[in-house]
Amino acid sequence: MKPAATFLIFFILTNACGPTQANQTPTNLPSVSIQTISPTSAQGSSLSSPTANEHAEEPPPTEYDLDVVFDYTGHNLEVREEINYTNSNGEPIKELQLVVEAQHLGAGFTLTGLQPISGSNIGEPEFSGGLLHIPLLSPLASGESLQLELEYFLVLPAGSGTLSWTDRQTNFIDWYPYIPPYINGQGWLIHQPALVGEHSVFERANFDVHIEVANAPASLQVAAPAPAEVHDSTFDYELHNARRFVWSASGQYEVLDAHLGETKISVYFFNEHRDAAEASLETAKQALDLYSELFGAYPYESLSVVEGQFFDGMESDALFFLDQYYFLTYSHDPRNYLTALTAHEVAHNWWFGQVGNDQALEPWIDEALCVYSELLYYENTYPHLVDWWWEFRIDRFHPQGSVDSTIYDHSGFDSYVQVVYMRGSQFLRDLRTAIGEGPFFAFLRAYATLGAGQIASREDFFSLLKEYSPVNLDPTISDYFREQ
Ligand SMILES: [Zn+2]
């Protein structure tokens, strides 16, 4: 694992999904189909080594129990957070670090209480640079668990954003302190924000969230990544094996629902965009169906699409935001960003949610797959629009550069999107051509299945890929990557 970048930039310019930017246009590709393909070699990948996986004990996910009072008109949260963490890292931990992203996002975070419930005693905590350092008076040995209780007060800033409020919506992305991944021999894996992209790395976790809303209008709607148990003004949620718990509240949301089997799909939108919301709902349902077939079963009970008042989009498990601009510019035709990006964000449930990655240092791992998943959606749903998709999303931008760049390599959104998203999707196109339809889709499915719950690296990606490839991929990889 590479060391964490250490420089700090004070705001995040852009979010997850690069829309408005991006050689060859493929001829009409056949509809994808599931085939049973076995690896062509027995080379080991850390995602695929059967002997290691069969015998390794799955470490228990960290448990977050969040008890929230949300003052709707006061724009603040009072939170009691209980964290149950097991050290499954193979070496003792002397200091726990919690990421408090709220500080980077301009929210006022005041810690009002911190005590261990069980496990190690703790020393005096120190809070700086968006990190809460908690010394453990006796190191937490490998295999041992620690239960902590935090109490804090969070004041949301005004303005459109991922953790803020406007007169139309209040958004809660990265609103609670969380434990980052730990790398043996290196410590906590924490990155600082950059001008572009996302920098957080999340381990899978379980969430038990209780939200009591005060001073809210009767028309309040809460969008969340799980079905709610609602009693008066309280909302209870359980979300398991997810990277994070994201939610949004508004007195102005209208809601459209659909079902795909047992999964409830909802779109939360503003009333002037009903036609667009209907289109997004239909796309989300079609994409969820397709990706479940191609990559493996969707792991959550519901999926929420939220019309957002901040730039672009933001993925999360079982819930994503899409900029109101895409609803506004919906053209009553699938040739638009709303349709393409709805499919893109649904795909993040596999490429981010199921298979995690280091979004700061290896952002292509999830983003290239999500852009390419858009194409898979069009191939299956609107096959006559495949050429349109390549031109609209990729070719007209004439992307250049190496796919393996970090979020810190770019001073602007365009170059970042070109290499990570657009060159990344061209790489996947050439990869598919090189290895063939059957191995390509067998690889994607194996990667989604074996990588579920893990944080995959490029080494994981390539070593598993080579197991499924009947040809030498070095020439294709060297066309797109600086390092083999
Ligand atoms: Zn994305």
Image: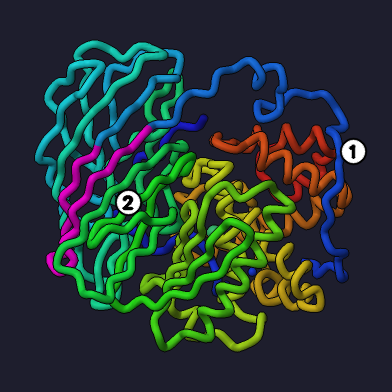
Indicate the quadrant where residue 357 lies: top right
Residue 243 in the image: above or below residue 185: below
Q: Are marks 2 and 1 in contact (CB under 8 Å)?
A: no
Disc 2 Cβ-to-ligand 1 distance below 8 Å: no
* 77 is within the stretch colored magenta: yes
From the viewer's perspective, is residue 261 above or below residue 269?
Answer: above
Kind of residue at badge 1: Pro
Farthest residue in the front direction?
Answer: 231
Give the residue at x 65% y 33%.
459
How far across and down, in percent of the image, does residue 310 sit?
37, 70
Q: Name the residue rendered at 53%, 64% in the picture.
A: 265
Task: Describe residue 454's horizontal placement relative to residue 478 as left or right.
Answer: left
Q: Which mark is residue 470?
A: 1
The magenta segment:
63-81
Q: Toward which corner of the image does residue 308 lie, by quadrant?
A: bottom left
Q: Left of 198 or right of it: where is 46?
A: right
**Residue 419 showing in the rendered view:** no
Residue wearing tag 2: 236
Q: Quadrant of ligand 1?
A: bottom right
Give the Cα separation between the discs numbered 2 and 1.
49 Å
